[in-house]
Amino acid sequence: MTNTDKEKTQTNSPDEITESLRLRLKQVIDPEVGMNIIDLGLIYRVEMAGLAVCVDMTMTSPACPMGDILLEDVEKALQAGLPEGYTLNLQLVWEPIWSPDMMSEDARAHFNWED
Amino acid sequence: MRVRISTGKTKLNRKLRILLFMAALISLVSGLLTGLARLGVSVPMQVQAGNHGAFMICGLFGTLISLERSIAMARPWVYLAPTASALGSLVLLSGVSDSAAAGLFSIAALLLVLASVVLWRKQPCVHLAVLGLGAVMWLIGNLVWIKSGLIMLAVPPWQSFLILTIAAERLELSRFVPVPALARRAFLLIVTAMSLGALLLATQARLGVVLFSVSLLTLMIWLMRYDIVRHTLRQKGLPRYIATCLSSGYIWLGVSALIMLAGEFVLASPLRDAALHAMLLGFVVAMVFGHAPIVLPAVTRLRLSYHRALYIPLLFLNASLLLRIFAGVVNDFELKQRAAEGNVISLLLFATIAVFLIIRQRQA
């Protein structure tokens, strides 16, 4: 992201900022599944709270060792899009337990779910 | 920008992870050398060929699987599992006492069982129960080894440990695709029957082998039908590579089951080696090849970026394994030796390419 982009982000409303961060999270791909973590339903929350952006994410299994790597990827993806002076609160959460209902319509269609 | 990351976990020293990973690699090298020595191939050092299975399954996979679990859970006590397993493989290598090594592997397995219980309490899902059952089978195999002093008797429960661990992960990933409730229940029945079959093999060989191999065949069909690989095979890059490794692995799992079903799992059969290695190399090692780009960074923090060169060792592994099965069918011992060397070369090839890709990534 260029400086101009950053300035733009700073002047955006909270909704626009969270939307742009969600778009950035779409660049983070689950390497096994080959799909982004937003469509897979692994991001539970992207919210502004004062000068903080709160992101809650989950994993499909607490036995999976790649949590830290995925968190690192998420942090990298968000870093460039976060307005100056804001804090990123990134949390790995296990409640509620992930289920296929949390996937986006696109993801469900991709995996042949008939809704 | 300030970043606060909260995982509810304690991060443990990277050095400890790497040390444990190195111990697993030492076990791998010992396993390869003992494997070759077992087939009469001359190796550069004196090794206890009879301990091949213990090095590969307990020292290598036991350590790696419990290390992966420790990283996922990030609780200091869980790290005692890979530590005990790593110590077990070093004791085994030293030749001081096989039973002390088996004892350490048993402690590791027991800790892995406990870790699985903790995970299951956190999320009572079927795949975590299957993962726990895998750890139980590792423990049983180790106890059988201690009691009998025979690694041979521990092999079927050990095989189940690896199959259940992989199957549990595939079951977890199958949640992305629609799987009928009946098929999910069938999965549980299949893995339970397979575990029972593995346990029966020691006392009621015929019944055990039929139950074990028919369950494995059914598991192969289940995985081919419901695994996410049906979708990821159509993608590009890493997902397709992983899917290719798994697909070839499923075929080998079926081959292994068919050889066993044909009654060739008995010690005297020249095809016993084929049945074991179709499963442990064709299925398990191919799975390792596929997942190394994911697991290696998680364990060592070294990124291994995907490159199509990773297909070369997979191809070499499959070709040399095919040769090994053929050598068993025609009962040609010398050919089996060459094929086993080919198996080792495919692993070395994989390691070389992986190191090259890691270095390239770091320089980028």
Image (cartoon, rainbow, N blue to C red):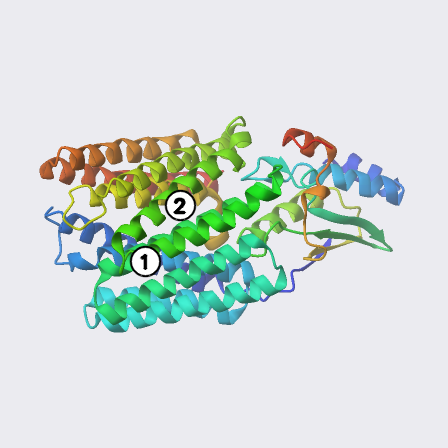
Q: Which mark is residue B200?
A: 1
Could you tell which of marks 2 and 1 lies nearer the N-terminus? 1
Residue at the image point whose x is 13% and y is 50% from the top: B43
Residue at the image point whose x is 23% and y is 47% from the top: B265
Residue at the spot of label 2:
B215
Residue placed most toward the observer, A76 or A30: A30
Residue at the image point whose x is 87% and y is 55% from the top: A50
- Expressed as whole percent of the image width and height from the top left, the position of residue B221 reads 44, 36
Q: Which mark is residue B74?
A: none
- Expressed as whole percent of the image width and height from the top left, the position of residue B296 reads 45, 49
Relative height, residue B290 to residue B92 (above, below): above
- Expressed as whole percent of the image width and height from the top left, the position of residue B204 reads 27, 57
Q: Is residue B129 left or right of residue B98?
A: right
Q: Chain of mark 2?
A: B
Q: Is residue B13 left or right of residue A41?
A: left
Could you tell me the amino acid type at mark 1? Answer: Leu
Do residues under tags 2 and 1 come within 8 Å of each other at their CB atoms? Answer: no
